[in-house]
Structure formats: C-alpha cells, structure tokens
Amino acid sequence: MLKQAAALILIRDTSSGIEVCMLRRVSSSRFAPGAYVFPGGGIEEQDEVFNISLDGSKSNTAKIAAIRETFEEAGILSGTSANTHHFSAHDRDGLNKGEITFQHLIEQHDIHLDLESITFYDHWITPEGAPIRFDTRFFLAIANVNQEVFHDDAETDASCWAKPANLLAQYDREEIKLMPVTHVQLLRLSDVESINDLIENSRQQTISPIRPILNFNEDGKPMSVTIKLKEGIVDYPVFLKKS
C-alpha cells in the first residue's frame, strides 16, 4: 500500500555556494536506517484538516505536511517569516507527541503560512516489491543563512547544513548513506549556481512521477534499482536495512 508523503529540501545561499539541510535517520528506523535525508514524512489527517481551514486546495495538503515534518524533525519553520525562536522546546515536543496539532501551534502564535513560497520540485514513488512504499512529493524552500537545524533525537540523530558536492563526495568514500532518490537530487543541486533560478525553473516545469523499478536475483531478493530520469537511465544498488 502506498503512503502519501512529503519532504522539504531546504536550501540557503552562502558565500561559497548553496547548502542543503540534511538529517540522519536513526539506525533502528524501519525506513532508510542510518541514511542522510531531507526532512519529511507521511501526510497526516491533521494536514488535511489544516488545509481545509485555509483554502481547501488539495495540492496544499502536501505542502503543509512538508512544513510540519520539517519543524518536527529539524526545528525549522518554513513558509513564513517567523524564526524558530518563536517556539519553545515544549511546543515542538508537544507536536511530536501528538498532544497538539500543527494548526493549533500556528494559530496559537498568530503565524501566517505563506504556502506560495513553497515550490513543488520533484515526485517519486517507491518501486513495487519494496517492503515500505511512499508516494512522495518534494518541495523547495529557501532558508535564512543564520538558521540552525536541530535534529529531534527520535527519528533522526544527526543534522547539518552541507554543500551537495561535499555530501556526494562523502557518499563516494562510503562515509555516509544515501538513498537513490536523495543521491539523484543532490547531483542536480550540485550544479545549481542561483537559488532564484532554481526556484523559477522548478515553477515552470511539468513534474511527472519518477517510478524506480526493482531488479531481483534468482533467489527473489532485490539486487538493484533502475531509474528512468530526464538525464538518462541509471542503476543503483538497493538500500537495505542491516540485520
């Protein structure tokens, strides 16, 4: 069964190039254990309820989920001019525990979400045959250069701002783990010179779902994944959880 999900690629300009916000998933995670990922997660009923209270546009539910998940996992609130200092650790903890909803938190602090500032960027569907499958929409958001990231020590145990090229080099040296979807997006981001151009180009393009295909060996175990991209067809080893 496919679970609807959303992720947010937070980018910021620095004097030496763009950086992205990354989180490392805990090793006990059922999905992508130990991998560096963009903040994100499953779309929840509270996201749909919040969206209806705003304008009811179904396309914005995923944006709200991406913003919420990023605040829960990274401590950064996007889609608004507000900074994280408006919130206490208690606010974030209450949201993570389900004691309050994201809508309640936003309304309590009288904050306006600017969903137009969140840009649809990519769309991936986990291949058939995978134990956990997601239909994930990826969004772009620009972060303040001084904005810090704080992982939640629950779903994630490390966090950083890093240049895409540096992350790719670490992956090549087998210092970090990346899922194929993350590797592909970091490759594309490593060529970006202007965030504004990236945002503008993303808003003009037509985005179709990318559907990787799992390849199995004679024993029926997945051995690789084939992905048809605009750059061409690529193959990656499967991302497996260590036993």
Image (tube, rainbow, N blue to C red):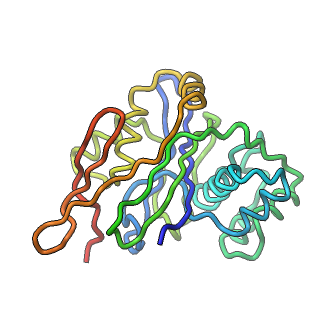
Instruction: Tell me where residue 67 appears, x and y as whole percent.
Output: 66, 52
Name the residue: 84% across, 53% down.
54
Q: Nearer the viewer, residue 168 or 89?
A: 168
Q: Quadrant of residue 44?
A: bottom right
Relative to 147, residue 96 above or below: below
Q: Quadrant of residue 27?
A: bottom left
Instruction: Tell me where residue 181 appears, x and y as whole percent.
Output: 38, 49
Instruction: Tell me where residue 240 appears, x and y as whole percent.
Output: 27, 67
Name the residue: 27% across, 60% down.
214
Q: Nearer the viewer, residue 36 or 130?
A: 130
- Judged left or right of residue 86, residue 162 is left
Instruction: Tell me where residue 63 appears, x and y as whole percent.
Output: 66, 50
Work out which quarter of the rendered image holds the C terminus and state it: bottom left
In the image as oriented, which residue stretches furthest toward the left? 218
Relative to 142, residue 4 above or below: below
Name the residue: 57% across, 44% down.
139
Q: Nearer the viewer, residue 236 or 85?
A: 236
Name the residue: 55% across, 26% down.
201
- Judged left or right of residue 47, residue 185 is left
Q: What is the tally of numbered marks visible in this picture?
A: 0
